[in-house]
């Protein structure tokens, strides 16, 4: 960027009240750090903010906005500035935008719950939001693709609290058990857990709960701690800033949403269930998961449960849809992903800690399992770089 170029004044109509939006702001900030020359304007507000008086007298060059209310849409149209939308509501459909991939979130949720042997599924959504409705539709689609059904619940909310928690508790009581429930986001997941407490339903033994957003505060303060899907908010915010930079430079950016897949499932106690009626499969699963932090072979599992490989593979495929070796690989790669996301260990150090003889072998296995090389996965999870 030329040093004498005037600063670009950009307003961020993105709420600061939840972890998802703060992740978006972090991604925007990462882009601005790499591309100096922006003057950012942001005010503390909620998702449904209608007071934009803080922009009175502001003369800017562009907007990044979560256009989820008619008031925000009217402001965007009135200002007439280059704008990138961060909402699935599409209240200003002519805008380019970036959003989390709800189909990928739903697919990951179904995989996580089905991996625990669950055969009953349910979705708790927030009917105010288009992304929640889409998330629920895709969840039902992926459940049905496995030959099962899913029951749906639409929350009616006022602010951050539910007015129908008793109705939610009654719905949960009426579900077949054990059941895996995807809450459309962590706040809804928190309310599902509270409704289970009201109804006296044990979690996760009867109801396994999974949220979305990986809000550390909610995830660790709920009882039990809430499992959650971590969206790639930093990449989403980064891409939105990159697109706005192009718009402000006079480039044409086509309208429509670009969808960003989530990073991973962060498992906590609320979904840690093994709902499999076959005691031999359960014993094998517990053995694999208890020893997944070090090298483990199929023969080790066979000796532990006293079975032949063919017989145990048949049982695994029947209940889980995969072989014993595939389950070992899945658990091992989940541990690799966790260390890449939460530590600064080098690849050889990760391999050594998990009992891989060679980091090259671990890297090949990880890319085969996840579609991403370990280094790329770590960059996607830990932050955003120029792209």
Image (spheres, rainbow, N blue to C red):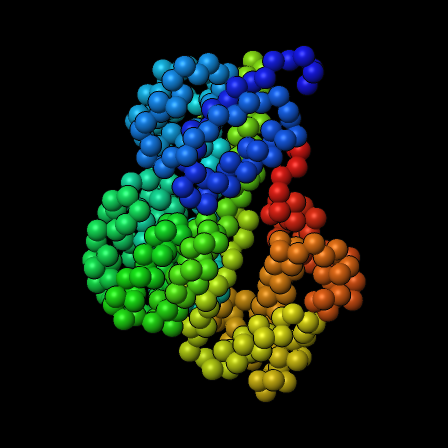
The residue lying toward the viewer, choosing from 134 and 141, is 134
The residue positioned 33% from the left and 32% from the top of the image is: 49
Is any part of residue 72 visible from this angle? yes
The N terminus appears in which quarter of the rendering? Answer: top right
> Given the current orientation, which residue lies at the most extreme bottom position?
306
The residue lying toward the viewer, choosing from 239 and 21, is 21
Instruction: State the image quarter where residue 28 is shown.
Output: top right
The residue positioned 72% from the left and 61% from the top of the image is: 350
The tally of labels here is 0
Is residue 369 positioned above or below 85 on the image? below
The residue positioned 48% from the left and 54% from the top of the image is: 216
Q: Where is residue 341 in the image (x, y as percent from the top left)?
A: 62, 53
Q: In this view, does 59 lie to the left or right of 189?
A: right
Instruction: State the image quarter where residue 18 is shown.
Output: top left
Q: Where is residue 230 in the image (x, y as percent from the top left)?
A: 50, 50
Is any part of residue 329 visible from this angle? no
The C terminus appears in which quarter of the rendering? Answer: top right
Q: Position of residue 144 (x, y in %)?
A: 37, 55
Q: Where is residue 98 in the image (x, y as percent from the top left)?
A: 49, 33
The residue positioned 60% from the left and 31% from the top of the image is: 31
Is residue 356 positioned above or below 299 on the image? above
Instruction: State the image quarter where residue 356 is shown.
Output: bottom right
The residue lying toward the viewer, choosing from 151 and 141, is 151
Is residue 332 positioned above or below 142 on the image? below
């Amino acid at each position: 960027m030329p040093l004498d170029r005037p600063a670009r004044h950009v307003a961020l109509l993105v709420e600061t009240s939840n972890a998802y939006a703060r992740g978006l702001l972090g991604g925007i900030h990462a882009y601005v750090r790499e591309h100096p020359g922006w003057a950012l304007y942001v005010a503390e507000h909620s998702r449904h903010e209608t007071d934009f008086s803080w922009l009175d007298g502001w003369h800017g060059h562009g907007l990044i906005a979560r256009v989820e209310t008619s008031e925000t849409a009217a402001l965007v149209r009135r200002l007439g500035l280059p704008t990138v939308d961060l909402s699935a509501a599409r209240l200003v459909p002519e805008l380019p935008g970036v959003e989390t991939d709800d189909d990928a979130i739903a697919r990951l949720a179904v995989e996580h719950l089905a991996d625990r042997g669950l055969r009953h599924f349910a979705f708790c959504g927030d009917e105010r939001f288009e992304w929640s409705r889409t998330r629920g539709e895709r969840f039902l689609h992926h459940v049905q693709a496995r030959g099962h059904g899913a029951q749906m619940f639409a929350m009616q909310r006022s602010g951050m609290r539910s007015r129908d928690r008793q109705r939610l508790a009654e719905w949960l009581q009426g579900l077949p058990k054990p059941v895996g429930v995807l809450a459309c986001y962590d706040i809804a997941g928190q309310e599902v857990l509270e409704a289970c407490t009201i109804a006296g339903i044990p979690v996760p033994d009867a109801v396994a709960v999974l949220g979305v957003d990986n809000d550390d505060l909610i995830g660790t303060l709920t009882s039990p701690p809430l499992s959650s899907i971590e969206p790639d908010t930093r990449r989403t915010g980064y891409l939105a800033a990159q697109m706005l930079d192009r718009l402000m430079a006079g480039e044409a950016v086509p309208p429509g949403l670009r969808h960003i897949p989530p990073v991973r499932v962060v498992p906590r106690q609320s979904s840690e269930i093994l709902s499999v009626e076959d005691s031999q499969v359960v014993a094998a699963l517990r053995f694999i998961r208890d020893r997944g932090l070090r090298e483990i072979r199929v023969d080790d599992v066979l000796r532990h449960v006293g079975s032949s490989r063919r017989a145990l593979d048949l049982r695994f495929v029947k209940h889980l849809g995969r072989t014993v070796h595939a389950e070992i690989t899945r658990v091992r790669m989940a541990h690799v992903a966790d260390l890449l996301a939460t530590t600064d260990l080098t690849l050889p150090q990760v391999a050594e800690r998990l009992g891989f003889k060679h980091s090259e072998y671990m890297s090949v296995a990880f890319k085969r399992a996840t579609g991403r090389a370990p280094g790329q996965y770590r960059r996607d999870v830990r932050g955003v770089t120029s792209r």
